[in-house]
Amino acid sequence: MPAFRDIVRRIDSIKNTQKITKAMQVVAATRLRRAQAAVQATRPYADKMVEVLQTVSERATEYKHPFLVRREGGRAVMILVTTDKGLCGAINVNNIRAATRYMNENYKAKQQYVTLGRKG
């Protein structure tokens, strides 16, 4: 059986760990609120962008940009948008896998990739 002093030390250690955990939880909650506020602030911008893109796509049915027209020759370029920072799970890996799968299914030869973002 552990000595009384060992039990007291153990209790103190657990209390200190609880304090640290609580502080980390408070910091995480603050960051979450800040991130949610940033998302809410960008919502009107995103809604307006969707509206503008819908209007443009409805009115520009006859115009075909040369970069978007499928031609003979077999070359294809995929532009991948990746993150600049980490801690976002497997989003970059999933984007790259989906892009390579799409390119392998639709364009067999002469594939090129351009990445935007540091983690790509």
Image: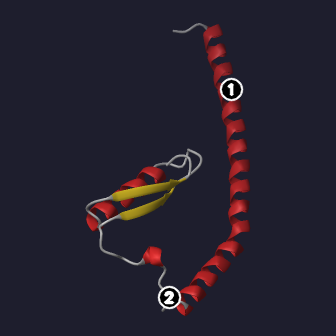
* Residue visible at 52% across and 46% down in the picture: 119
**Three-letter amino acid code at the position of disc 2:** Tyr
If you read the primary sequence from the N terminus, does the residue marked by circle 1 or circle 2 appear first? 1
Q: Position of residue 12 (x, y in %)?
A: 68, 20
Relative to 60, say whether 12 is above or below: above
Residue that carries the numbered disc 1 in the rendered image: 15
- Taking the image as shown, residue 29 lies to the left or right of residue 96, namely right
Q: Which residue in the protein does label 2 denote?
A: 63
Disc 1 versus disc 2: distance between alpha carbons?
68 Å
User: Taking 10 as reference, is 91 above or below it?
Assistant: below
Along the horizontal axis of the image, is 86 left or right of 46? left
Name the residue at 27% across, 60% down.
109
For residue 111, side relative to residue 17 (left or right): left
Residue in front for this viewpoint, 116 or 31: 116
Q: Secondary structure at mark 1?
A: helix
> In the figure, residue 40 lies in which quadrant?
bottom right
The three-letter code of the residue at mark 1 reads Lys
Note whether 27 is above or below 67 in the view shown.
Answer: above
**Residue 64 point in image, percent of width and height:** 47, 84
Camera-side residue of 4 and 69: 69
* Mark 2, secondary structure of its residue: loop
User: In the rendering, at what x and y percent does residue 8 appear?
Assistant: 66, 15
Residue neighbourhood size for the residue with mark 2, other residues' Cα within 10 Å, grouped as few (<14), some (14–19), many (≥20) = few
Number of numbered discs overlaid on the protein picture: 2
